[in-house]
Amino acid sequence: MFRLERSFFRFARALSDAVLGTVSDIVTTEDDKNTLRISQVEAFNAVRLPLMASNLLGIFVAWGNLGNVDGGVPLAVWYAGMIVLVVVDLGTAPRLFGYRPTAEEAEHHYWRSAFVRFVYGIGWGLAIVLFYAEAGPQGKLVLTVLLSVFLCSSVFVLAYLPTAVYAFAVPILALSAATLVLAGTRDHYFELLLMGIFFVAFPFTLHRYTRSFAERALALVKVDEQNQLLTLLLNDFEAHSGDWLWQTDNDMRIQRVSDAFYKQSGVPAENITGITLDQFIGAHLPDDPDAASETVRSRQLVKAREPFRDLPIQLKFAGKDQWWSVTGTPTYDRDGQFKGYRGIGREITKQMRQQMTMTYLAHHDTLTGLANRASFNSEIDRIRRAATLNGCRFALVMFDLDDFKAVNDTSGHAAGDAVLRALCKRVEKALPPSAFLSRIGGDEFAAVIELTLGEDATDVRDIASRVVAAVSRPLRLPEGRFKVSASAGIAVLPDDGNDIRAVMQLADIALYNAKVEGKERVSVASAADAAAYAYRKQLEVDLRKAVDEDALTLFFQPVVDASTGKTLLFEALARWKHPEFGLIPPDEFIGIAEQTGSIQEIGAWALNDACRQASAWPEHVRVAVNISPLQFNLDELPRLVASTLRRNGLEASRLELEITESAYLGGIEQVQKIVAELQALGVTIAIDDFGTGYSSLSSLQHIPFNKLKIDQSLIRRGPAQKRTLSILRSIVAIGKALDLQVTAEGVETEEQAIFLRRLGCNSLQGYVFSRPMHGADIAGFLIAETSRGNRKSQSALQQGNGIVAA
């Protein structure tokens, strides 16, 4: 017996290795093999009791139908042996229910079960060997049917233990085939054929079921491991995280929430369990209508069974507002029936308060609490849409505090801040409750007032006058006593235009007019203001076209030597002849060009055209070009000048660039750098408008200019005013002391020319010598000047000869 068992185990292990080879791509590790063994033993243990019952039933059926076979002793021995086998199988097998073997136990029970199946197969195979030949037709039929049932069912019932299937089926097949062959193949060829087909087919079916079972067993283990991991993570999540899980049933009744939920909300569990999610939210709506409407939206999403993620909800617990971020997903069963919601939530009260603070700071002035410029721009967009779509009318009121800078200068910024806060409160009280007030600058404010039917600019003027009067009342604060006044400008949308930006500009113009008229004034935009604004906007558009179409022209005004009267250079002056408005003065369109950004293009054109025309002049005649402060502060200016000189073949010494102190907007260091680079090229630099307040002595100290030009406003007043005379003498003295050339511009009379010549100016410029001329007229002007010079020289020679003869 033991020899048989050892032989069986050698054969069975070899067979098992072959079977495992069919699932080698699935069972790749020792853990996988152990897992599969445990699953096989558990699955077989579940069907072991029905197997023993079927074997007992088969034994009783065989006994009942083979009782008439000769030789009752073998039948009794077989019957007793099979009964003992069933009892031994029952007694030595593991317990039937709730048994989970270890890897070692599973290996043992696997091979024990295979060996027992082998003994069962020997037992049933001996039945046909011992009793088939002597049995009657009914007995033979019963044996054939019993063995056929056991063979076919073993492939499925014992598929969990593929080795056991072979151990059970092979002995039955072998012994049955031998018995039928001995009984005569002619009489039993059909049975033998069926047995051959089964012998060939059942391994394929068995291997397929074995592979399917292995895949399923390993997948279930992995799913179980993942579930355990998820359970562990969720338990850890609920224990250590502030987030909480929630779940409802298909009626949206709350089934489960984490402990963190109860801690955060303070709501007892008995007040939550069993109520619907909608009831819970409805019982804790906040007082704020806007927040409540957002929370109601979440209820609508839940009712519609839609998923939502990070939905902010504001609720109220124990009189305190809380914000939650809630994520929820509807769940469904296999039939597509709604099962409820599952989700996660967390409290975000702190984050929401921080976000609300940031939002407030982004839209409000931190000093006064009023809306800031960003909010004002949003309001402007809103009223533009309302005026367009609904025909609403709005008044735009611009306020400006008069001389508020003096408060900061005399009392300090802390006092100035206190004054601003107090004045803002006065303004808010004086305005209608529906007005939108914003601080758009240091001491600049804007208010938007919606006009009702029948109201016009006069009504708004009354409101603005009340504001101005309220601001102008004396103010007593802990910091001191203050008196501040205000001015206001008013424009109405759409009465003063449909373009909101144009209306804003008109309000600014009206404010400017109010300040020009005096303090504590209110001015309403007029038709003249609108016309002036339209005129300026038209010039902006047309100036761009003029630059693109080369519609600008250079005129030239000579600068003469104060002693000889000979022309030293011509100053290039840009002129624009508008097709509709005629000649536009430079002080109009240059300012527009600087604001619109086209000054760079105009400046480059003027420099190039001046150099081009100057290259055709006599070599002793130079050209001067004015450079805009915006252009002068560009690092590219020296390179632009150098390339322009090369392109036109003009010597650098024949070019003079004029700048004003406004060029210092980039800092004195930037001006020093640009001046040094230009002078290194050989270009001379003149400071223009000296003496008007735009220039200072400090600039002469830090920047080595070559020339300074006295502004024409000083020349006009001239020697008639004693103070002006002193200023002129000082300027000339400074120029000589710093070795600078001094030019007086705006010389309009011969008397002024004589005075400035005697004062010590090196050169003069003005109408008395020539008005600005077209470039084509310069050649004739220089020829005429030469002729005048020759006549003066010839006259002086003749006078000299007469004196000698006498």
Image (tube, rainbow, N blue to C red):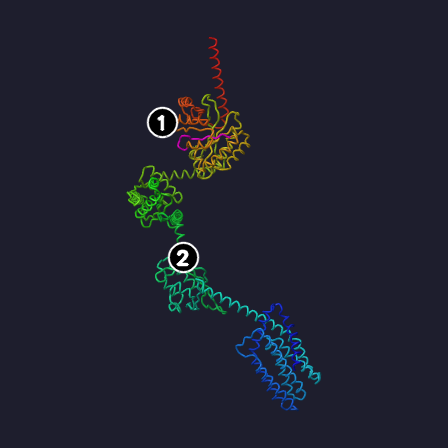
| Crowding near the residue tagged with mark 2, few <14, some 14–19, many ≥20 C-alpha atoms within 10 Å | few
**Quadrant location of the N terminus in the rendered image:** bottom right
Look at the image and tell me whether residue 574 can be seen. no
Amino acid type, callout 1? Arg
> Where 736 sits versus 800, above or below?
below
Work out whether residue 301 or residue 328 is closer to the camera in this orientation and state it: 328
Q: In which quarter of the image is residue 542?
A: top left
Kind of residue at badge 2: Lys
* Residue 723: assigned label: 1
The one nearer the camera, 547 or 310, is: 310
Viewer-proximal residue among 441 and 510: 441
275, above or below 614, in the image: below
Q: How far apart are marks 2 and 1 (CA)?
A: 69 Å
| 414 versus 280 height, above or below | above
Q: Where is residue 130 in the image (x, y as percent from the top left)?
A: 66, 87
Q: Name the residue under label 2.
A: 350
Residue 687 within the segment the image draws in magenta: yes
Residue 573: image x %, image y %?
46, 30
Name the spot of residue 183 as percent of width and height, x first: 70, 85
Secondary element at image label 2: helix
Q: Can you tell which quarter of the image residue 489 is in?
A: top left
Who's the residue at 42% across and 39% down the image? 537
Disc with the residue nearer the chain's start (2 vs 1): 2
Element marked by disc 1:
helix
Q: Residue 345 carries which label?
A: none
Q: How many marks?
A: 2
Look at the image and give the residue range highlighted in magenta. 683-694
How crowded pointer 1 is (Cα within 10 Å; few <14, some 14-19, many 20+) is rated as few
* Residue 259 falls inside the magenta stretch: no
Task: Say if residue 340 shows up in the picture.
Answer: yes
Residue 623 percent location from the top left of the image:
49, 28
